Amino acid sequence: MRIDVITLFPGMFTGPLTESILQRARETRSDGTSLLDVHFHDLRQFGTGTYKQVDDRPYGGGAGMVLRADVVVKAIEKVTEEGRTEGIRDSDFGIRTSKLNTQHSKLKTPHRIYFSPRGKRLTQANVEKTAKRDWLILLCGHYEGIDQRIIDGGWIDEEISIGDYVLTGGELPAMVLIDAVARQIPGVLGKEESAQEESFSASLGRKKEYPHYTRPEEFRGMRVPDVLLSGHHKEIEKWRKEMSG
Ligand code: SAH
């Protein structure tokens, strides 16, 4: 999957995307592509005038600044064009792991997401659907948000909210989506089952997962439930079903 992120603060993504599972998913495979090929585009470079202005005061007055339609649309169009030419490619992270997969290296239509408190609330079902796409463009708002004409004019396919609270920008929501989507991509997690029987997954009826225990068997007077030590797979399965909810 290719993901293009349009943001005023690409630096915010260092850390979440350069550690652990997401870092590994971004590493280059033997065919020169990555399972997760993420590209960052600084909105500032599409700014207007000598000062590369990206925002302006809202019509009708009020506090805050609004990201300009001309600037944002220029960015979306340029990023779309670039992605079509490049496809899924090498994201320059060394280690070569799994085998050839050129099937998805050509890209046609990006799914363009804008993060907004006004958007549809993100759920695991939506995450699974999104993970099946081969190309996402994520637009991170900042300040007051973006000019509505970017949405009304058809440059955004979906508005997503990560919850009913307001953040300073769309960068954290973008990281949340990338993280949730990445672990649904086959090969990203060590064991594939681990993405299947999980909280909110279809196989758990969208319910919350059962609790987990590991060694020691007794910790400060608390014992691991007997059924988990019994070795009876049917019983364990039954217990886990009961404990999900
Ligand atoms: N004026 C807006 C808030 C803007 S917050 C309002 O009252 O609705 C600035 C940016 O942060 C937004 O453009 C959006 O991209 C992002 N953002 C803030 N909260 C968010 C949330 N809960 N979900 C998704 N994006 C959010």
Image (cartoon, helix red, strand yellow):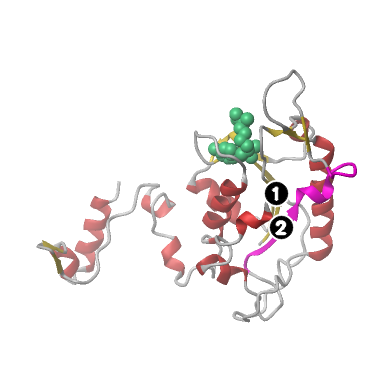
Mark 1 and ligand 1: say if the CB distance to the nearest ligand atom is below 8 Å: no
**Residue 78 position within the rendered picture, expressed as x and y whole percent measured from the top left:** 84, 52
* Viewer-proximal residue among 13 and 23: 13
> Residue drawn 79% across and 42% down?
72
Within 10 Å of the Cα at label 2, are there few (<14), some (14-19), or many (20+) other Cα atoms? Answer: some
Residue position marked by numbered label 1 in the rendering:
7
Q: Quadrant of ligand 1?
A: top right
Quadrant hosting residue 155: top right
Question: Left or right: where does residue 213 sit relative to residue 159?
Answer: left
Numbered disc 2: secondary structure:
strand
Q: In the rendered view, tell whether residue 161 sits above or below residue 174.
A: above
In the rendered structure, are the residues bearing label 2 and label 1 in contact, judged by CB atoms less than 8 Å apart?
yes
Span shown in magenta:
35-52
**Residue that badge 2 annotates:** 40
Q: Quadrant of the N terminus?
A: bottom right
Mark 2 belongs to which amino acid? Phe
Q: Residue at x 66, y 36 (%)?
A: 143
Query: Residue sitting at 54 percent across and 46 percent down?
Result: 126
Q: Secondary structure at mark 1?
A: strand
Q: Position of residue 95 (x, y in %)?
A: 62, 81
Question: Which circle marks residue 55 in the picture?
Answer: none
Where residue 116 sits, quadrant-wise, is top right
